[in-house]
Amino acid sequence: MAALNVPFDDRTPHLELQADGETFRLLKPVRWTPRANFAIRHDLPPGPLRVPAGFVTDFASVPRLFRSLVPRAGRYSLATFVHDWLYRAQPEGWTRKKADLAFLSAMRDLGVPWLKRRTIYHAVRIGGGRW
């Protein structure tokens, strides 16, 4: 019997709230494997991405004004871990654009509705940090 292709190893993040009350530390790694056709189309480096235990995230960095439309945490939370880690670690072979596209793909893998994921993606493209 063939193994199922599950893009995220575990959909339950194990987190610890930090003293600032705004950020969380991963207690267990998060691993995401881009779909092969997506990785080839966008020339992504091969293999899974692994966000290490100990990584600190604020979930989605959404300005307060827009949090009623896009809360900081949601169905897309695991995708924000991958995206934040790519921005901070800047692994070889990755660019800001590839990191943003990976975020879009990971949100699709998590079942984020098309309009919401496209809105979040374009917000990141416009307002995302420097690479």
Image (cartoon, grey):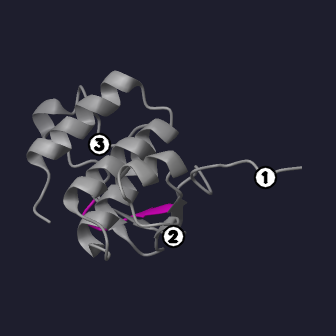
Marks 1 and 3, the one that precedes in the sequence:
1
Q: Which mark is residue 101?
A: none
Q: Which residue is at 55% across, 69% downward?
A: 28
Q: What residue would you read off at disc 3?
A: 72
Residue 130 percent location from the top left of the image? 10, 62
Q: CA distance from mark 2 to mark 3?
A: 19 Å
Image spot of residue 115 (x, y percent): 32, 22
Looking at the picture, how far across and down is residue 21, in whole percent? 28, 58
In this figure, which residue is indicated by the disc labeled 1? 3
Whether residue 18 appears in this view of the structure is no
Task: Return the residue nearer the eye: 111 or 99.
Answer: 99
Looking at the rendering, which quadrant does residue 58 occupy?
bottom left
Question: Is residue 19 inside the magenta stretch?
Answer: yes
Vertical order, 118 against 11 (above or below) = above
Image: magenta residue range = 15-21
Q: Amino acid at mark 1?
A: Ala
Looking at marks 2 and 3 on the same chain, the residue that comes earlier in the sequence is marked by 2
Counting other residues with Cα less than 10 Å from the Cα at mark 1, is it few (<14), some (14-19), or many (20 or more)?
few
Secondary structure category for the residue under label 1: loop
Structural crowding at the residue carrying mark 3, measured as other residues with C-alpha within 10 Å and reported as few (<14), some (14–19) or many (≥20): some
Nearer to us: label 1 or label 3: 1
Does the rendering let one see residue 100?
yes
Q: Secondary structure at mark 3?
A: loop
Instruction: State the quadrant of the C terminus.
Output: bottom left
Cβ–Cβ under 8 Å for marks 1 and 2: no
Disc 2 designates what residue? 27
Dot 2 falls on a residue whose secondary structure is loop
